[in-house]
Image (cartoon, helix red, strand yellow):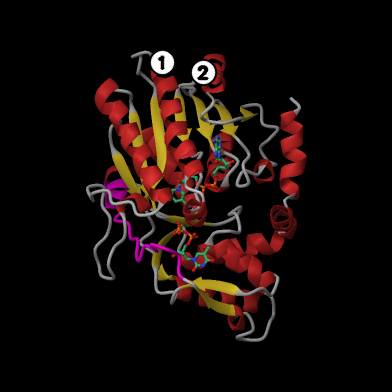
Amino acid sequence: MAKTKKILITGGAGFIGSHVVRLFVTKYPHYHIVNLDLLTYAGNLENLKDVEGSPNYIFIKGDIGDEVLVDDIFAKYQITNVVHLAAESHVDRSIKDPLIFLKTNILGTANLLQTAKKHWANEYEGKLFYHVSTDEVYGSLDMGSEMFTELTPYDPRSPYSASKASSDHLVRSFWHTYHLPVVVSNCSNNYGPNHFPEKLIPLMINNILHKKPLPVYGKGENVRDWLYVEDHARAIDTILHQGKAGETYNIGGHNEWKNIDIVHFICQLMDSKLGKNEGESERLITYVTDRPGHDLRYAIDASKIKNELGWIPKETFETGISKTVDWYLNNKEWLQHVTSGAYQDYYSKMYDHQ
Ligand code: NAD
Ligand code: TYD
C-alpha cells in the first residue's frame, strides 16, 4: 500500500494554496490534507468548493501564529509534512502597512517551525517542512540576461520581500541549528484562475470587463517572469516528494514580459474573445505614479529543478493566459463575490460559529 502522509497546508484558501490543495486532495486520496487558513481578504473557500467534501480533506480556520491552535493541530492530526504558503502577499499593501507582513510572514513562520520541531522531536524520518517563497527575496535585476540562481545573494527591497527573506532565513536556520528537515522554493510571479484581482493580470482582466481604467505603474517597462499557477503546484508536488532536505529550488517559466506588453496582450486577447472592436480595451490604459522602490526586473534560472528533479512547466504564456482569461469569463460570479466582499460573509460566518 502507498505510504500515507499527513500534510498541513497553510494558506490553502488563497490563490496558489487552493491549487496545491486541489492537486494533493485529488492525486493522493490516501493522504490526509489539513488546510489551515485565517481567511483574510485573500482567503476564499469558494476556490475549493469542488474538494470541500472529500474524505481526505479538512479545513480549519485559524492563524498560523496561534501557538495553541497550531500545537493542537500537530497533536490531533499527527502532522508529518508542512507545506507552508500562508502569507501576506501583495507588495503594494506591504508598502502601506508593513507590520502585518512581519507578523504573519515572519512570526507566523517561526511558530510553525517551533511547533514542528517540538512535535517531531528529533524523529525526522518521513518528515519535511516545505516553505514556499518568492524570487523577490533576491532583489532586482538590470535589463540584460542575468538571472536569479539559488546562489544569488539576498537583497530584498520591499517590506513584503524583506519579510519573506527573513522567513526563508529562519527556515534554513532550523535546518542548520536543529537538523529540522526543511526545503525552500523561490518562485517567480504566478498567474491563473482564482487570482485575487489586486495583482496585475487579474486586475487588468477585471477592469477590462468593467470598462475601468487599466493602471500601469511608471512607464510599464518593469519586467516580471510569469508562471502558470498549476505549473507551480506541480513543482511543489515534485519538490515535496523528491526534493532533498536542506536544499533550495528556484521555480520559473523562462517567460519574461514587460508589464506594458502584457497589458496590450491581454487587451487584444479579450477584445477578440469578447467580440469587441480592435483597440477598444487598449484605450483604457492609464499611466499612473510609479510604485515606490519598484523592482525593475525579475528573472529565474530554473535549471536546478529541471536537471535534478525533472520538472518543467507545461503551459506556454499564450496557452496559460488564454486559459486564465477564459476562467474569468466563465466565473463572473466568483469575481463579483470577490470584488463585492460577499465571499467573506458566507464562509467566514460558517466557520466562526463552529
Ligand atoms: P494569497 O494572498 O492569494 O493567499 C494567502 C493565503 O494565506 C490566504 O488564503 C490567506 O487567508 C492566508 N493567510 C494570510 N495570513 C494568514 C495567517 N496569519 N494564518 C493563516 N492563514 C493566513 O497568496 P498567494 O499568491 O497564493 O501566495 C501563496 C504563497 O506563495 C505566499 O507565501 C507567497 O509569498 C508565495 N509566492 C507567491 C507568488 C505569486 O506570484 N503569487 C510567487 C512566488 C511565491
Ligand atoms: P504584482 O502583480 O503586484 O506583482 P509583484 O509586484 O509581486 O511583481 O505586479 C506585477 C507588476 O505589475 C509590477 O511590476 C507592478 C505592476 N503593476 C502595475 O503596473 N499596475 C497595477 O495595477 C499593479 C497591481 C501592478
Magenta stretch: dominant secondary structure:
loop
Q: Secondary structure at mark 2?
A: helix
User: Amino acid under label 2?
Assistant: Asp
Q: Is residue 176 left or right of residue 194?
A: left
Label 2 within 8 A of ligand 1 by Cβ: no
Q: Which residues are magenta?
A: 290-307
Q: Is residue 252 above or below residue 346?
A: below
Residue located beneath label 1 in the image: 118
| Residue at the spot 42% in from the left edge and 36% down from the top edge | 106
Q: Is residue 145 above or below residue 120?
A: below
Residue 181 percent location from the top left of the image: 33, 26
Marks 1 and 2, the one that precedes in the sequence: 2
Residue 116 percent location from the top left of the image: 42, 21
Residue 323 appears anywhere in the view: no
Q: Is residue 12 left or right of residue 154?
A: right
Per the rendering, the mark at residue 233 is none
